Image: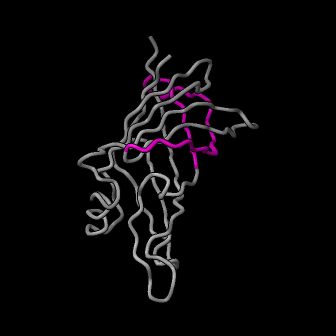
Amino acid sequence: MEWQLDASHTSASFSVRHMMIATVRGHFDQASGSADVEDGKIRSAKVDIATGSVATRDAGRDQHLKSADFFDIENHPHLHFETSNVEHVDGDKYRIEGNLTIRGVTRPITLEAEITPVVKDPWGNDRLGVSATGQLNRKEFNLNWNVALEAGGVLVGEQVKIEVDAEFTHAPN
């Protein structure tokens, strides 16, 4: 049964090292998607995130991330994630495997997740939540831009931590 992503109760964020000393955090403001849910369990899911909705609390950095140096939003307006396997680990813990596409490059990724049981909201809709974390190497997605620092190291780290909190909803028939 298809459930819809509730974009107003969903967040997708990332963090990466800046100059090898500080962690810069950002998020995306627009997401859409759906999940196949049977007997209260997610069987599969698809999520699209609008790359042009990136926000890091710095307008100049946001514009640079939207440029061809990074997300290239003119040619790649969305990130896409599609599950390939959702494995129950223990209790509310799950391992979600899937394919992530950034800038036209698709790579497998594994996320550690907590998935809530289905609850009924005050309006009679069914809802469930997913909180997932993972990590990727941005260079594997052709996000290669960087600047070498005079003292050694680089301006932007390669490892990017990602966090997703998503809520899916379904109106009963």
113 in the magenta segment:
yes
Residue 88 position (above or below residue 105): above
On screen, residue 139 versus residue 110, left or right, reads left
Q: Residue furthest top?
A: 173
Prevailing secondary structure of the magenta residues: strand
Dividing the picture into quarters, in which one does residue 155 lie? Answer: bottom left
Q: Residue at 34% of width from left, 49% of height from top?
A: 29
| Quadrant including the C terminus | top left
Residue 140 image position (x, y, % from top left): 50, 53
- Depth order, front residue of 136/29: 136
Q: Is residue 153 on the magenta stretch?
A: no
Can you say whether 69 is above or below 115 in the image? below
Residue at the spot 38% in from the left edge and 66% down from the top edge: 145
- Going 37% across and 51% down the picture, which residue do you hit? 28
Measuring from the top left, give residue 112's x and y in whole percent.
64, 45
For the image shown, how many numbered marks are present on the structure? 0
Relative height, residue 17 to residue 7 (above, below): below
Q: Nearer the viewer, residue 33 or 103?
A: 103
x and y percentages locating residue 54 in the rendered image: 33, 55
Figure check: 44 above or below 93: above
Task: Determine the residue positioned at 44% across, 28% down.
Answer: 34
Relative to 64, is 88 on the left or the right?
Answer: right
In the depicted view, which residue is nearer to us: 94 or 66?
A: 66
Magenta region: which residues?
A: 104-133
Residue 59 position, x and y percent, is 26, 67
Q: Residue reaching furthest left?
A: 74
Near-viewer residue (166 or 21): 21
